[in-house]
Amino acid sequence: MNRLSNALRRAGVTLPVAVAIMLAACSGSAAEPSTETFTKTINDYLAERGHLCLAEYQWPRYVADDASGNSRDALQMPVLEKLGLLKSTVMPVERTGDDGAKVSAPGRRYDLTAEGRKFYLHKPVVVATATKQETHDADFCVANLTLDKVIGWETPVKDQDGTSRTSVLYTYHIDPAPFTNDPEFRRVFPMVTRVVEGAGTLQLREGVRLTKDGWVAEEFFQH
């Protein structure tokens, strides 16, 4: 995923440079790092972004029968179809050949079913790639996370623009969709399984910055 579903991948969140915010505008209670302060910050963050998603934000999806063209989808899409979340149609699809040229190959088009659309969340979702984070307007999400407890935080540091930043370590509760217990789903989405099984013990990390309204999760400033 990776969403790790989007939630696990946040454990390695980077801290982008932001617009300067004067610390003098911050109230002492809101600015002071504490378990109480960061509990509110992470609760606010998870209320908006605490969705465990599959980074499946483009539908329909076209998958070549030859798994070399799209191995992840070739493994995962049939499982989601068996669970009643997708419906496929046999048709030629375009994929990249071994020489880099586009070729037509036997394949399937996968569309969300009425049941599957229940899990297609139309809210901003942050997706981590190998080089950056991207925000999409929707994603296929399979669980919701809420805060268990704040474990700790790094000593806040100031950027050149004077903005204070740190990262908060926390554990979580999770409310997964029933189909995440299916053995085939767990096999092809191992990172989702890890997050579900890690509720209460697996520690996630979220970067935060100090604003005039107190500490706020970095993801709220992503575009």
Image: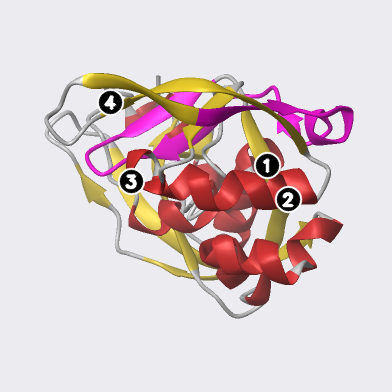
Given residues 25 and 38, the one toward you in this image is 38
Q: Which residue is drawn at 31% across and 45% down?
A: 165
Of the residues under marks 2 and 4, which one precedes in the sequence?
4
Residue occupying image coordinates x 81% and y 58%: 179
Name the residue tied to disc 3.
Answer: 68
Q: Residue furthest front?
A: 106
Residue 113 visible in image? yes
Q: Which circle, 3 or 2, is nearer the viewer?
A: 3
Residue labelled with disc 4: 18
Residue 135 drawn above or below residue 219: above
Q: Are marks 3 and 2 in contact (CB under 8 Å)?
A: no
Residue 70: % across, % down: 39, 40
Q: Which colouring convention does the figure follow?
A: secondary structure
Q: How far apart are marks 3 and 2 (CA)?
A: 33 Å
Which amino acid type is marked by label 2?
Answer: Asn
- Which of discs 2 and 4 lies nearer the camera? The answer is 2
- Check contact, mark 1 vs mark 2: CB within 8 A: yes
Residue behind mark 1: 141
Dividing the image into 4 quarters, which one contains the C terminus?
Answer: top left
Q: Residues within 10 Å of mark 1 (few under 14, many from 20)?
A: many
Q: Count the labels in the image.
A: 4
Give the alpha-carbon distance from disc 1 to disc 4, as whole Å: 29 Å
Q: Mark 2 points at which residue?
A: 144
The answer to if 130 sits in the magenta stretch is yes
Q: Name the secondary structure under disc 4.
A: loop
